[in-house]
Image (cartoon, rainbow, N blue to C red):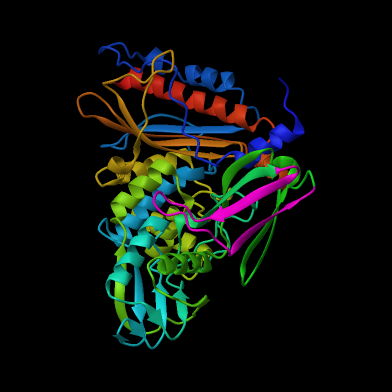
């Protein structure tokens, strides 16, 4: 059945944006017996054929493979060509944050009162204080409110304030991404639900739809008023956005809605979002609070309740697994202490040069922007320099498969890696663990920056040919892993 305009738009609307993991090899990476890897087998013409068969015309494919212990380069091609790293940048950010903050670092969210509490009443202000936690969700915020209620607080005579200046406020991570994608939210010192709001719609009868916006987690699903949606009778654009001090105002094209669906939208006022949800949860606990207001300077007062995140190593493991952009940016900004993203990216760039002797171009901490540049050879050098630390243990297992695409249980070759995907950019880098304990480091970058740059804003959500291009690039990555495991195991 052919695609209709309505069907295509509905698919874009309902589809949750998620990271694409690099395709596993099509054949088993069972190691060869000793003596099978001959000089002829290492002939780079074999690699050239694989690249040609991938049909990535116009793209540059850079790759490098080295011994993790000695740094000896075992195989490479266009390894010195700077290319966009996409989300492989998060591996660099993880190393940087661990170095600067330490694996035990935690982010803290607090509630403080500017006056003593007497008889369940604070004759002063209540302040929600953000510590930059990128993983705070509605359930944990609800638990924080429960601890606050356990102190006996029931009323505040002053204001409900929120302070979100622990980190610089960013309206979004990358200005070139589509307005409505949930992986490109705003961020600051007070974040909630990765700064996304849940939009759901269902046809209520006739041509009308029932719309809801909420801050759902597993246990709590509070409604949200600061983010609002209106249906407009049109075909395109899919969404429009307008924001003011009161929150986020969206419209959606009626032709895209169908009978029902849901998706996450980015929040552009994360401090207000978190404070409104806090107030709603507090009301459910019998705590009467006024409308929240932002405060520029952190007031002094007594801490009534607090919440601490997981340790940084756990947060970074989840970041590398799920490729959460906001976590990477918060980790990098917290590590640098810089006043903005450009200065923070420059600080990480300076650290990379001082720590590893690598000169690269870094524009952010997540790789979401397409202007960062680092070569496959440089990425391998970074991974080799970090191989004795936590980074290899935080990377996600990259299962190897047989010819039918099924994971091979108990496979003797293990791969731990980070993937990256942008339009016409596909990257993979990490560690290969061989039988006997030998460890290799590798990076495979395929990118067509010119083709990516030609995309219009409307094409960036799902560009023509983008999905098949990424699939071929991931297949090439799998084939190269197959080759290396066969040669060096």
Residue 286 located left or right of residue 53: left
- Position of residue 140 measured from the top left corner of the image (x, y, whole percent): 36, 58
In magenta segment, residue 43: no
Residue 312 located left or right of residue 211: left
Quarter placement of the N terminus: top right
- Position of residue 131 measured from the top left corner of the image (x, y, whole percent): 38, 68
Q: Splitting the image into 4 quarters, where does residue 54 fall?
A: top right
Foreground pick, 246 / 148: 148
Determine the residue located farthest toward the left in the rendered image.
436
- Position of residue 231 measured from the top left corner of the image (x, y, whole percent): 72, 51
| Image vertical order of residue 254 relative to residue 4, above or below | below
Q: Start and end of the magenta stretch?
A: 205-233
Q: Splitting the image into 4 quarters, where does residue 298 fall?
A: bottom left
| Image vertical order of residue 141 relative to residue 2, above or below | below
Residue at left offset 58%, top offset 65%:
226
Determine the residue located farthest toward the front in the rendered image.
205
Residue at left offset 36%, top offset 26%:
399
- The answer to whether residue 150 is visible is yes
């Amino acid at each position: 059945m052919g695609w209709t305009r309505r069907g295509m738009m509905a698919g874009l609307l309902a589809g949750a944006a998620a990271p694409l993991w690099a395709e596993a090899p099509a054949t088993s990476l069972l190691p060869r017996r000793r003596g099978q890897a001959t000089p002829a087998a290492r002939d780079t013409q074999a690699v050239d054929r694989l690249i040609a068969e991938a049909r990535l015309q116009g793209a540059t494919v850079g790759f490098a493979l080295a011994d993790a212990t000695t740094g000896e380069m075992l195989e490479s091609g266009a390894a010195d060509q700077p290319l966009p790293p996409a989300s492989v940048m998060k591996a660099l950010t993880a190393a940087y944050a661990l170095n600067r903050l330490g694996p035990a670092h935690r982010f803290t969210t607090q509630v403080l009162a500017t006056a003593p509490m007497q008889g369940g009443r604070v004759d002063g202000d209540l302040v929600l204080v953000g510590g930059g936690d990128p993983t705070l969700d509605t359930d944990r915020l609800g638990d924080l409110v429960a601890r606050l209620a356990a102190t006996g607080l029931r009323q505040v005579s002053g204001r409900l304030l929120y302070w979100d200046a622990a980190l610089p406020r960013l309206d979004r991570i990358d200005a070139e991404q589509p307005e409505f994608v949930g992986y490109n939210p705003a961020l600051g010192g007070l974040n909630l639900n990765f700064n996304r709001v849940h939009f759901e719609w269902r046809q209520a009868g006739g041509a009308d739809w029932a719309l809801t916006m909420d801050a759902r987690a597993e246990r709590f699903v509070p409604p949200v008023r600061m983010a609002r949606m209106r249906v407009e009778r049109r075909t395109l654009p899919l969404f429009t956005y307008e924001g003011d001090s009161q929150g986020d105002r969206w419209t959606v094209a009626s032709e895209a809605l169908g009978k029902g669906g849901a998706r996450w939208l980015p929040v552009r006022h994360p401090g207000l979002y978190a404070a409104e949800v806090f107030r709603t949860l507090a009301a459910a606990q019998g705590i009467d609070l006024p409308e929240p207001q932002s405060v520029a300077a952190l007031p002094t007062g007594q801490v009534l309740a607090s919440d601490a995140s997981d340790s940084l190593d756990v947060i970074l493991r989840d970041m590398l697994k799920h490729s959460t952009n906001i976590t990477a940016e918060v980790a990098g900004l917290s590590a640098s202490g810089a006043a903005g993203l450009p200065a923070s990216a420059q600080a990480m760039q300076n650290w990379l040069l001082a720590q590893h002797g690598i000169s690269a171009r870094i524009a952010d901490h997540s790789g979401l922007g397409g202007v960062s540049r680092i070569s496959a050879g440089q990425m391998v050098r970074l991974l080799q320099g970090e191989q004795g630390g936590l980074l290899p243990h935080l990377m996600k297992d990259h299962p190897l498969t047989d010819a039918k695409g099924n994971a091979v249980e108990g496979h003797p070759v293990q791969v731990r890696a980070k993937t990256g995907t942008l339009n016409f950019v596909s990257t993979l880098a990490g560690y290969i663990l061989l039988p006997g304990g030998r460890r290799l480091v590798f990076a495979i970058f395929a990118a067509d920056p010119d083709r990516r740059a030609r995309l219009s804003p409307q094409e960036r959500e799902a560009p023509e040919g983008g999905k098949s291009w990424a699939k071929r690039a991931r297949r090439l990555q799998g084939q190269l892993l197959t080759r290396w495991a066969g040669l060096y195991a």
